[in-house]
């Protein structure tokens, strides 16, 4: 069966996360989006795993369920350690097949950090040791480096990361099968590194509020079960793992280089000419994702590996509605129309990807239908994000289509 999954989210017990990140709200928004399977996030937190145990029911598939939404046990941890005298901070996602295994993982990891302090705990533990510990508990677990290109807390991050997967995981690299691309990169950018060809590239929302789930996600055509999903990812099975739903990476807040305080946004070439320093204040510029990709790549832009898996870009439907209406994305007008549309047509992803153009034009407001079609065609203009500032996207509308242009921010 075909379904959409978002594995990497956070609970209300993570820092800077909405109190609405609970099981009930997550299930509601998963249904609105058209997401069949959600990661639980944060199973390392004692209060969250207790809540999950009380609300989720084990399904015959081996997954857990709340009403019509399936859940898979996941958590994100921050590994803090030194390598060759340099500090490293790397985020990793752990998949667990069941609560019993998750609790055994928690008992081991509490020796390396305070699991109660945050839904995403900090562990004084090298990445390779994390893999060894988790897989020694249960070989059915999966460890995935998270948002691998962001400047901080990532595998290839410009500040505390590495230049290769092997440098980070050493002999345990053979147990790493997937990489999470993150909001500021897409598969095309990762295809420029031949060393990444064997890995399955996944995308997730890293959501801190219910509305953000599914802003990136994964498409499957396999049995809805833990072992089938993990097998599809480990084997990079193109018939079972159909691809990813992607943010336009330029919209990610670390796509380009820059210095937020001075509102300086640079391409990698401009950064090089400036000597990596902000021309306004002289401080070091934050090196973004595109810069790191170019530095580490051994292929030109546009290269497509033989075993590549497809992907699709998306802009959230609420953002499109808000700007057609000329109101804020959190307004009651947007919420009302959004819920009416997704209820009528079977979910947000159905509208964004599957409904035919003639149906969109006949059943939706014309401006909104045209926006959706242009996003499908990737006919957007983007001002890249940098140093923690999200990028800005515009959907260009001709004079014949509408007197003014729609700005998504």
Image: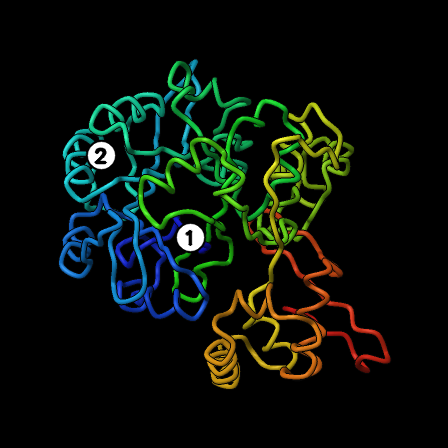
Quarter holding residue 313 = bottom right
Q: Position of residue 117 (x, y in %)?
A: 22, 46
Residue at the spot 39% in from the left edge and 58% down from the top edge = 208
Residue at the spot 52% in from the left edge and 86% down from the top edge = 333
Instruction: Give the residue at mark 2.
Output: 113
Q: Position of residue 53 (x, y in %)?
A: 15, 54
Residue at the right extreme, as displayed: 400
Quadrant holding the C terminus: bottom right
* Number of other residues with Cα within 10 Å of mark 2, as a class: few under 14, some 14 to 19, many 20 or more: some
Colour scheme used in the picture?
rainbow
Viewer-nearest residue: 107 or 199: 199
Residue 117 marker: none
For this view, does 104 lie left or right of residue 328?
left
Residue 6 marker: 1
Viewer-nearest residue: 235 or 266: 235
For this view, does 299 lie left or right of residue 7?
right
Residue at the spot 45% in from the left edge and 62% down from the top edge = 212
Instruction: Tell me if residue 293 comes above or below residue 121 in the rendering.
Output: above
Viewer-nearest residue: 11 or 245: 245
Q: CA distance from mark 2 to mark 1?
A: 27 Å
Q: Position of residue 144 (x, y in %)?
A: 40, 35
Q: Position of residue 255 (x, y in %)?
A: 62, 45
Quadrant holding the N terminus: bottom left
Identify the secondary structure beneath mark 1: strand
For this view, does 308 lie left or right of residue 104?
right
Let me know if residue 109 appears in the view.
yes
Viewer-nearest residue: 169 or 266: 169
Instruction: Tell me if residue 329 comes above or below residue 207 in the rendering.
Output: below
Of marks 2 and 1, which one's residue comes earlier in the chain? 1
Tags 2 and 1 touching, CB below 8 Å:
no
* Number of other residues with Cα within 10 Å of mark 1, as a class: few under 14, some 14 to 19, many 20 or more: many
């Amino acid at each position: 069966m075909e379904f959409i999954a978002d594995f990497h989210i956070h609970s209300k017990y993570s820092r800077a996360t909405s109190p609405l990140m609970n099981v009930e709200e997550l299930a509601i928004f998963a249904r609105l989006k058209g997401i069949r399977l959600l990661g639980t996030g944060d199973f390392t937190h004692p209060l969250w795993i207790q809540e999950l145990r009380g609300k989720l029911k084990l399904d015959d598939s081996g997954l857990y369920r709340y009403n019509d939404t399936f859940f898979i046990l996941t958590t994100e941890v921050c590994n803090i350690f030194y390598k060759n005298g340099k500090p490293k901070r790397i985020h990793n996602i752990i998949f667990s097949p069941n609560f019993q295994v998750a609790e055994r993982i928690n008992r081991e990891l509490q020796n390396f950090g305070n699991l109660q302090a945050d839904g995403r705990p900090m562990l004084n533990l090298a990445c390779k040791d994390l893999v060894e510990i988790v897989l020694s508990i249960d070989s059915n677990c999966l460890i995935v480096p998270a948002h691998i290109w962001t400047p901080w807390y990532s595998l290839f991050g410009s500040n505390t990361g590495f230049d290769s997967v092997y440098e980070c995981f050493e002999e345990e690299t053979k147990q790493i099968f997937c990489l999470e691309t993150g909001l500021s990169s897409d598969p095309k950018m990762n295809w420029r590194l031949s060393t990444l060809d064997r890995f399955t590239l996944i995308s997730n929302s890293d959501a801190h509020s219910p509305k953000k789930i599914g802003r990136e996600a994964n498409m499957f055509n396999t049995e809805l079960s833990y072992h089938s999903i993990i097998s599809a990812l480990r084997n990079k099975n193109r018939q079972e793992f159909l691809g990813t739903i992607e943010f336009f990476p330029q919209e990610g807040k670390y796509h380009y280089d820059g210095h937020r305080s001075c509102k300086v946004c640079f391409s990698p070439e401009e950064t090089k000419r400036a000597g990596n320093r902000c021309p306004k204040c002289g401080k070091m510029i934050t090196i973004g994702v595109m810069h790191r990709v170019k530095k580490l790549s051994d292929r030109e832009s546009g290269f497509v590996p033989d075993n590549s898996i497809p992907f699709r870009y998306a802009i959230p439907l609420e953002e499109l509605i808000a700007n057609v209406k000329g109101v804020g994305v959190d307004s009651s007008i947007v919420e009302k129309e959004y819920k009416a549309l997704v209820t009528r047509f079977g979910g947000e992803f159905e509208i964004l990807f599957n409904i035919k153009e003639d149906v969109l034009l006949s059943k939706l407001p014309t401006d909104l239908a045209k926006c959706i079609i242009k996003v499908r065609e990737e006919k957007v203009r983007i001002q890249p994000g940098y140093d923690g500032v999200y990028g800005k996207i515009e959907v260009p509308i001709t004079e014949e289509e509408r007197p003014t242009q729609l700005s998504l921010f």
